[in-house]
Amino acid sequence: MNKEKKLWILFAAVVICSFSVLGYYGFEIYQQSPPIPKAIVSDTGETIFTEADIQDGQNIWQSIGGQELGSIWGHGAYVAPDWTADWLHREAVYILDVYAENDFNKQFTDITDEQQAALKIRLQNDVRKNTFNASSNTITISQNRVAAINYLSNYYKGLFTNDPAFDKLRADYAIPKNTVKDDAKMQKMNAFFFWATWATVTERPNSNVSYTHNWPADELVGNAPTMDLMVWSGVSIILLILCIGVLVFYHVKSGEDEEMPPPAEDPLLKQGMTPSMHLIKKYFWVVTLLMVLQMLLGIVTAHYGVEGDGFYGFALDQILPYSVTRTWHTQLAIFWIATAWLATGLYIAPAVAGKDPKFQKFGVNFLFFALLIIVLGSMIGQWFGVMQKLNYLENFWFGHQGYEYVDLGRFWQIFLFVGLILWLALMVRPLLPVLKRKTEEKNLIIMFLISCTAIALFYASGLMWGQHTNLAIAEYWRWWVVHLWVEGFFEVFATVVIAFLFVRLGLLKTKTATLNVLLATIVFMSGGILGTFHHLYFSGTPKAIMALGATFSALEVVPLTLIGYEAYHNYKLSKATKWIEDYKWPIYFMIAVAFWNFLGAGIFGFIINPPIALYYIQGLNTTALHAHTALFGVYGMLGIGLMLFVLRSLYRNVKWNNKLIKVSFWSLNIGLLAMALLSLLPMGVWQAIESIEHGMWYARSSELMQNPNMITLKWMRTIGDVIFAVGIVSICWFVFDLTLKNKITQNN
């Protein structure tokens, strides 16, 4: 059995075994998720909230932006609090004050340490006991908790409606007046907030750990790190070190790739151009325009952190509230990156085949306009949803689903899924005749088609939750999209495409490229599939999720430790021969991808991966640090690099404006690094320290986040943002200057 066949078998085994485990524990999440009761009742039998209240409240929370306006269970935006951490702490303080007033006629903070300790134990005995009755499908709560609910319901009503007493706090949290427009809706959203908070402190049956594994940390209610958190954090670090050693040993033992003398001239000069390949340039117009729009929305979104009710004095929050600008900012990142990658695929498939199948040109045009409709339609729907102009059902289908990165309404999700299936057909049809010829590139093409199929089909996991699905179950499926689709199969697609481009340029042997792609995919998937669970430690999942997530997410970082070799290898290729100078900047963007893979995905990613670390810093600016440097640094730079490869091939005899693209390359990288090191990293570290000392409620509080020194750190981001903006505008200028001034050269 040859090496290539062994790797195919190993690849199949990794995928089958990993998805079997992922599916099994997905079933366990369905069985063990925090129950939504038929009713929440007081110990005197009074109904406080109903199941419909909780479910409608979840829909109302989704409609105002959901995870784009604060967060639930740590996942979401960073300006407003985590509502479960906030409710939990405020409820605890309220009840302790009631105890202290009744027992000592004093506030809780005014009694002795011994008295405080006794009252905290009384509180914990009340709130941590699981009073869910499966036979009656009810949760019973004490009169003290009922009183706390009434108090907090009025507090959140004032915050989310228009009570003048909350004007300053609303501005600090970037919550516009009348975000929720009537009292009945507000009461239902309070029902959802209470249920989600109940899950963070109530112990699972036959356990001393809450449904969210004692997250968030709050010593008043006894939420503290567990032994599992410590043990599996240690296991993940040990496993990381061990596997790095194994991978380094394998790499040294296998030696350098076989050297291949570069061709005398660019092989792509001899490649014919099909009609559909000419159409790809308009995809790149959309890519660059969406990049500019995303950048502008990012500026507005970041500014809301220092002026939450406007933009330099203009009441922008009444027209474009924070939850809308952040939704569009994050969603457009996915859209433009995906469009760049999909366009690259549309270029490569007919380039390999040498001709277009019937209706290929029509399909490329149709897909282009379909993507435009999806982008614009989903954005309009999200604005209508957040502005409370849609009812519950309309919002679910056409408005704002409230789940970060998959915010678009269900209709637009289905539309996008259909578009991806069309894209897959446009990939497969040109390549089937090539596969039948059984060329040397066959296995590389098969892997390319596998990645394309996964990209198209796995987006369907975003359709697996419904309007009233339990949040724990919705989170499980959401991370199939965010982690497996965005971070997983797009990564495989990128690996194959880069290898294929270097093969086509005559810089890599086909067999060498195929073996490298298979091995890289196996290593990545070994950790990447089950590494999905590291997003779910505290999302109402069983204990085993933590063990699997900690173990396999550590493996995700392992291949990134050798990323310097990849960067050096790509740099050498850029110097291989004179004609390769034409591809200098596309290759340099690949080198940038390697750098950000190591720093953004590797170092900044592993900072938040171990359970004990994530327990304290989930939902802080450490997450934003990883998100920006990994999403743009890796996937964004790669999208730009792939776009430039295609443009270089389309405009083969055109001299590029290298000064402009040089400005773009260095501005993007320096700006992103400055944004990370001058602002996001120090903010995240400061928040982490406060979270460890005081709790998550304080790390996200107005008191800390509006501290003058914290505001200074927020303004420091402007330095990196301005430099970064120069890079975005430059790449947009470059693309339009190139494509509008020059005609595509036809060579046969």
Image (cartoon, rainbow, N blue to C red):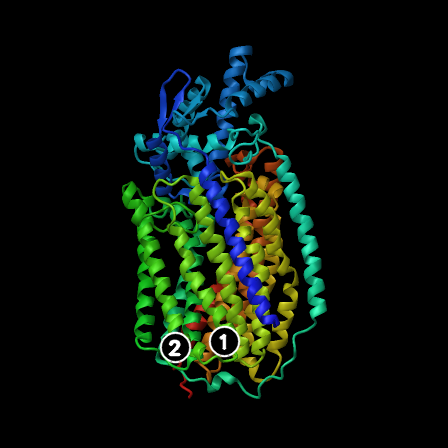
Q: Is residue 155 above or below residue 606?
A: above
Q: Position of residue 83 (x, y in %)?
A: 46, 35
Q: Is residue 321 left or right of residue 687?
A: left
Q: Residue furthest front?
A: 1
Answer with the quarter of the image where residue 520 lies: bottom right
Q: Position of residue 130 (x, y in %)?
A: 49, 26
Residue situated in front as seen by the camera: 526 or 50: 526
Q: Amino acid at mark 1?
A: Lys
Q: Position of residue 675 (x, y in %)?
A: 55, 55
Question: For the residue labelled by badge 2, is the local secondary structure a helix, a strand or a loop?
Answer: helix
Instruction: Give the quarter of the figure containing the C terminus.
Output: bottom left
Mark 1 or 2, nearer chain start? 2
Q: Which labelled disc corresponds to residue 442?
A: 1
Instruction: Give the quarter of the figure containing the N terminus.
Output: bottom right
Question: For the residue labelled by badge 1, is the local secondary structure a helix, a strand or a loop?
Answer: helix
CA gap between label 1 and label 2 equals: 22 Å
Q: Which labelled disc corresponds to residue 277?
A: 2
Q: Is residue 256 left or right of residue 426?
A: right
Look at the image and tell me whether residue 698 can be seen: yes
Q: Which labelled disc corresponds to residue 306?
A: none
Residue situated in front as seen by the camera: 52 or 164: 52
Q: Residue at x 35, y 54 (%)?
A: 413
